[in-house]
Structure formats: structure tokens, C-alpha cells
Image: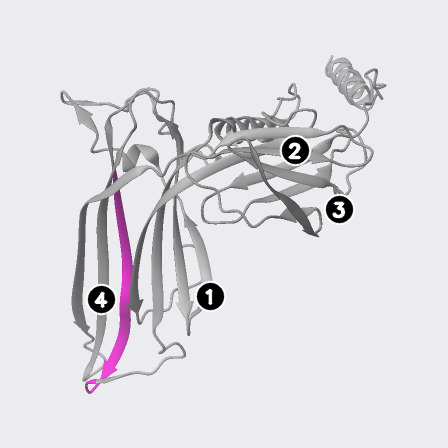
Amino acid sequence: MKQYISALLLFILTGCFLSCEKDIAFKGTITDPLLVLNSLLTPDSVVSVHLSQSRFILGDIKPFTHISDANVSLFVNGSLKEQLTHDANGQYMGTYLPKAGDEVKMEVKARGYDPVSSQTVMPHNPNVVVNDSTVTVETWENEMPNQPNTIFKNRRRNMQVQLKLTDAADQENYYYIKATLNFYRHGALVRQKDIKLKLSELLKSNTADSEHIFEDVFGDGGTTDRTENLFSDAYVNGQEILFDFNFDDTLESSKYVNGVKEESSHDDELIVEYIIEIAEISKDFHLYIVSGNKAANAEDAGFSEPIQVHSNIDNGLGILGAYNSYRFVSRFESEYYPYYGER
């Protein structure tokens, strides 16, 4: 009996593996390549556009083909502003710095492709102010019984910042929030790290009638996708939104013998910089990030239907997005040189 069951399992498993290897012919239509336009507008940078050629999803994996001979026209508020100039690798640069409220339109013509166009509106700068800010420094010393005349000195810095965003009423607004930690030595950036944020923690001070106004709106699952820092004003239109940040840093961790600090290989001071950015983003850019993340997750999971990534490019692919951001920056000196791993 055992031999029969073993033989049956072997037959079933063999059939499964054979069926997995079966070639399925593609019965769709392979369309001509499309022009791909990607551009992200911000008041801090001149207008730029990247152009490339789409590739067949089932084709060979190879670098995208850059488009270097296109005619790229920039229109602002209905009038032609300038022609963008090709720089390198499909990148086209202009000289115009977009302004809040600008209606921006791109028109692109390239040999062998249908003309493409897209338009967006530059968001206004989000109404953000520092609602509260506190910095405390704590120092303590430890004596070592087995090391006479030796102490270990530690200093830590804690910064608590509360930012208040006032959402514009009767408008459909989309926001993105991020925080970055930078380290500088001799004026040069030596390390940069994106700080993982959790909206449920940042928004814990938002209450109305003793209830959390964001309950069941923002997830608390600790996901790591690109949408976890996105939020809209769908449930908080026209309200004030509070964000609470808490950052801890070691300023010094030194050994002193007979009152003299022991030298180390990193005695030169660091400049530590925190940047908190709250940006209002265009709706199309919001939809592009959300759909793109869903598509990437579906691809990683396997055995799922493809998800269409949002695009606002007429006759082509890609995204013309825009954002306008508020920045909170805090810089301070530190004698502590962190490891380059996770903090």
C-alpha cells in the first residue's frame, strides 16, 4: 500500500512540474513602441523632461532607448514659454522655474513616434508652521572601578518638533511627507539616510471630540512600500493636521583619563542635519505612485494579473507630475561619529 501511495504522489508531482514547463504562446498584438515622457516639476528646479522608448513587456530585458532628437515645447498658462534643449541620455533641460498655480503643458514631437502631450498644475506651497519645538541635551558620566582616574562621558540630544499643516478647504489635496538625516565632514556630505516614518505615530495628537480623526484612515501595519508616506485630505478637508517628530542623537561618547580626553580616529566634528519635508503633490503624481507601487507588489508576488500604472501622457506613457514643499531644517555639531549601518 505504501508503495502505491508513493508511486501516486510521484505521478501527481511529476505531472505538476511538467505542466509548469509548458510554453504558452502569446496571442495578443505586439504594438509599436511608444514615447515615454517622465517629468517632475518643482519651484526649486528648472523644468526638465526625460524621454525614452517603451519596450514590450515580454521582450528581452535591456536598457531603455533614450530619445535624443525630439522637439520639446513648454507652455505655461497657455503661452509658449521655451523649447527645451537636449542635454544627455534623453534628458531635456529648460530655464524656467515653475511657480505655484502655473498651468504647465508639454508637447513633444520625435521622428517615428506619434506626438505626445501632457499638462498639470503646479500645487501651492502647503500651509505648514512650527507649532512647537523643544531641544534637550542630557549628560552623564560613568566611573570604571577597574580603571582608576578614568571616566566615560556621554551626551545625548533629543529634539521634539510638532508641525501644523492647515489644509485648504473645498479643494482636493494630496500630500507626501519624508524625513532625511545627513552627515557632513569638512563641508562635504559623507552619509545620507531616509528616516522611516509611520503616519499613525506622527498623527497621534490629532483628536476631535476625544476621538482620533485619522482612525481607520491611515494604516498601522508598518508597511515598507512607497505609499506609506502619502495621504490625502479626503477625511480632513479644511482641518488643521498636527505631525509629531521625535529624534534622538548621541553627541559624545568619550573616554577621559586624568581629565584628558582620549584621542580617536574621528575627533573632527560632524555637522548633523535633519530635514523634514511636507509636500503637496499633483493628483496625477499621487495616482502614479499608488498604482506603480501596486504593480510592483503584484509582480513580486507572482501569479497575478498585471496592474495598469497611471499615466497622464496623451499618446504615450509616463508621468508629468508636480510638487511644492515646505522644509523644516535642523543642523547641529556632534563629536560622535556614527557607524555607517542602521541607526
Q: Residue 94: x and y, percent?
A: 59, 48
Give the residue type that dot 3 points to. Answer: Ser
Give the residue type that dot 2 points to. Answer: Glu
Q: State the separation of the CA atoms marked 3 and 2.
A: 15 Å
CB of mark 3 within 8 Å of CB of mark 2? no
Residue 244 lies in the magenta-colored region: yes
Residue 190, numbered label: 1
Say which of 1 and 225 sits in front.
225
The furthest residue to the left: 209
Say which of 253 and 142 sits in front.
253
Counting residues from the start of the chain, the first of labels 4 and 2 encountered is 2
Residue 68, numbered label: 3
| Quarter of the rendering containing residue 152 | bottom left
Q: Residues within 10 Å of mark 3 (few under 14, many from 20)?
A: some
Residue at 58% of width from left, 25% of height from top?
310
Can residue 219 be spotted in the picture? yes
